[in-house]
Image (cartoon, grey):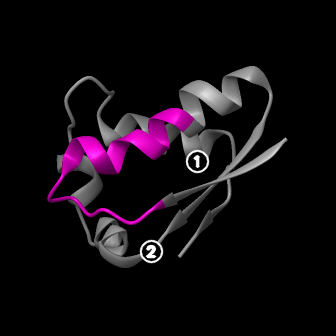
Amino acid sequence: MRILYTVSTGPADPTKVSLPFHLAMNGSHEVGDQPELLLAGDATGLLASGVIDSVEGVGVPPLRELVAKVRQHEVPVYV
């Protein structure tokens, strides 16, 4: 099943911005679904140099690890 996760929160709320990545990679992808991510609004701030490396939410893996999984598994990301 294809699932589109919309990320609209920016790096100012590290836990909230990390949750869609976490659910996509450690949830949907792990059970065989085809997750996709859409960055909208404040989430586009993640594209600035060095931002992904500095985002660490509570109770979720650091965003840099989640994005590495996104890249490794070639999950589509739309902006």
Q: Which mark is residue 71?
A: 1
Nearer to us: label 1 or label 2: 2
Looking at the rendering, which quadrant does residue 66 occupy?
Answer: top left
Left or right: 79 as drawn, with respect to 19: right
Which residue is painted at 35% across and 43% down in the image?
18
Neighbour class for label 2 at 10 Å: few (<14), some, many (≥20)? Answer: some
State the extent of the magenta-drawn residues as a range. 7-23
> What is the secondary structure assignment of the residue under circle 1?
helix
> What is the secondary structure assignment of the residue under circle 2?
loop
Left or right: 35 as drawn, with respect to 32: left
Place of residue 21 in the rendered image (x, y in percent of width and height, measured from the top left): 47, 43
Place of residue 13 in the rendered image (x, y in percent of width and height, measured from the top left): 18, 52
Mark 1 to mark 2 CA distance (whole Å): 19 Å
Which residue is painted at 32% across and 51% down in the image?
17
Q: Report the front residue among 63 and 27.
A: 27
For badge 2, the amino acid type reads Ala
Place of residue 73 in the rendered image (x, y in percent of width and height, measured from the top left): 68, 40
Q: Residue 40 carries which label?
A: 2
Place of residue 33 in the rendered image (x, y in percent of width and height, measured from the top left): 78, 35
Which residue is painted at 29% across and 34% down in the image?
62
